[in-house]
Image (cartoon, helix red, strand yellow):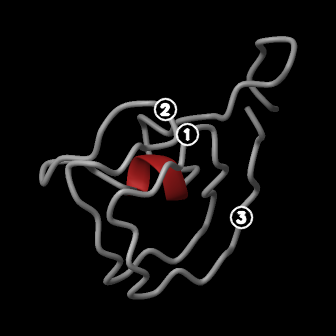
């Protein structure tokens, strides 16, 4: 599986229904107005729901921020 880097990407109003974002790095990406659906796979491999807090994938200061795993399994510093 490839690892996509979308750091700081402008995904404003992007149509991401059905997208597979598994392992994508969305750090500081602009997802304002982006459209997701129940078929969207999030970076952590889970499915999107209306309750999903997408800042967990975009805001490194978020207390539950998801770090893309490194090949050695460690979190970045």
Residue wearing tag 3: 7
- Residue 22: which numbered mark, if any? 1
- In the picture, the quarter occupied by the N terminus is top right
- In the picture, the quarter occupied by the C terminus is top right
**Upstream in the sequence, badge 2 or badge 3?**
3
* Residue 73, placed above or below residue 42: above
- In the rendered structure, the answer to whether residue 8 lies left or right of residue 26 reads right
Disc 1 to disc 2: CB gap under 8 Å? yes
The residue that appears at 69% across and 73% down in the rendered structure is 8
Whole-Å distance between the Cαs marked 2 and 3? 16 Å
- Residue 53: which numbered mark, if any? none
1 or 2: mark nearer the eye: 1
- Residue 44: which numbered mark, if any? 2
* Residue 57, placed above or below residue 35: above
The residue that appears at 61% across and 66% down in the rendered structure is 28
- Circle 3 Cα neighbour tier, 10 Å, few/some/many (<14 / 14–19 / ≥20): some
The residue that appears at 63% across and 57% down in the rendered structure is 27
Which percent across, then down, holds residue 40?
Answer: 34, 51
Whole-Å distance between the Cαs marked 3 and 1? 14 Å
Whole-Å distance between the Cαs marked 1 and 2? 6 Å
Indicate the quadrant where residue 7 lies. Answer: bottom right
Which percent across, then down, holds residue 16?
Answer: 40, 68
* Residue 38, placed above or below residue 71: below
């Amino acid at each position: 599986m490839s690892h996509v880097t979308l750091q700081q990407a402008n995904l404003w109003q992007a149509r991401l229904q059905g997208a597979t974002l598994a392992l994508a790095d969305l750090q500081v990406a602009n997802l304002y107005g982006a459209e997701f659906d129940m078929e969207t796979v999030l970076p952590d491999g889970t499915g999107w729901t209306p309750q999903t807090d997408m800042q967990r994938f975009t805001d490194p200061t978020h207390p539950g921020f998801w770090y893309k795993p490194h090949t050695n399994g460690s979190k970045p510093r």
